[in-house]
């Protein structure tokens, strides 16, 4: 029986070495796939962080524009009340103010969307089933001890 076992090993024709090579190739493909997934995730995080930075600058500029347009509306309204300008000037400036306010809201919306995309890129999810129930939540005080949440009395807030 020893001879038969040895002859089986000799007559495999490289099947074992081919299986090892296939396993290594599968491993290398898995490593390359994992590397690509990690690089894509890092790119998404970097893209969203840069979007948030740019949108913050844009939101500041829009807020300045809204403030300036509001001041212009106030000035023109005072001039209209004094009788020095036509009401069409006030309406035109109010239209400008409304456009600036809409632009500011659009930037704020884009910031919220970019924040959600960043959290998603970091691996966060939005499944409410994974959230802890009210009783499981605890408040952490600066001393490092867990304090249970305050109970609400009947008729309280």
Image: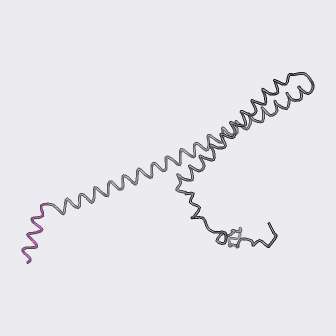
* Residue range highlighted in magenta: 1-13
Residue 48 falls within the magenta-colored stretch = no
> Looking at the image, which residue sits at the far right?
82
Picture coordinates of residue 128, whole percent (x, y): 59, 61
For residue 73, what is the image quadrant? top right
Residue 12 falls within the magenta-colored stretch = yes
Say which residue appears at 16% left-offset and 61% top-offset: 15
For residue 141, what is the image quadrant? bottom right
Picture coordinates of residue 157, whole percent (x, y): 79, 66
> Looking at the image, which residue sits at the far bottom?
1
In the image, taking residue 20 as reference, residue 82 lies left or right, namely right
In the image, taking residue 121 as reference, residue 31 lies left or right, namely left
Instruction: Please say if 47 is above or below 143.
Output: above
Count of marks placed on residues: 0
The quarter in which the N terminus is drawn is: bottom left
Say which residue appears at 28% left-offset and 58% top-offset: 24
> Looking at the image, which residue sits at the far left?
3
Say which residue appears at 68% left-offset and 36% top-offset: 103
In the image, taking residue 23 as reference, residue 33 lies left or right, namely right
Picture coordinates of residue 58, whole percent (x, y): 66, 38
Instruction: Please say if 15 is above or below 33.
Output: below
Instruction: Please say if 13 is above or below 89.
Output: below
Q: Main secondary structure of the magenta part?
A: helix
Picture coordinates of residue 124, whole percent (x, y): 55, 57
The residue nearer to you, when weighing 64 against 129, is 129
* Picture colour scheme: one colour
For residue 156, what is the image quadrant? bottom right
């Amino acid at each position: 029986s020893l001879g038969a076992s040895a002859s089986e090993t000799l007559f495999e024709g490289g099947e074992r070495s081919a299986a090892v090579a296939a396993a290594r190739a599968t491993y290398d493909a898995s490593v390359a796939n994992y590397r690509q997934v990690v690089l894509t995730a890092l790119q998404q995080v970097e893209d969203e962080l840069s979007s948030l930075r740019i949108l913050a600058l844009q939101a500041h500029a829009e807020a300045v524009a809204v403030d300036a347009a509001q001041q212009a509306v106030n000035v023109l309204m005072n001039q209209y009340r004094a009788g020095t300008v036509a009401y069409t000037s006030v309406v035109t400036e109010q239209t400008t103010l409304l456009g600036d306010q809409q632009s500011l809201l659009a930037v704020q919306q884009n910031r919220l969307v970019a924040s959600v995309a960043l959290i998603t890129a970091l691996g966060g999810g939005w499944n409410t089933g994974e959230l802890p129930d009210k009783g499981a939540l605890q408040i952490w005080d600066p001393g490092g001890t867990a304090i249970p949440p305050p109970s609400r009395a009947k008729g309280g807030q």
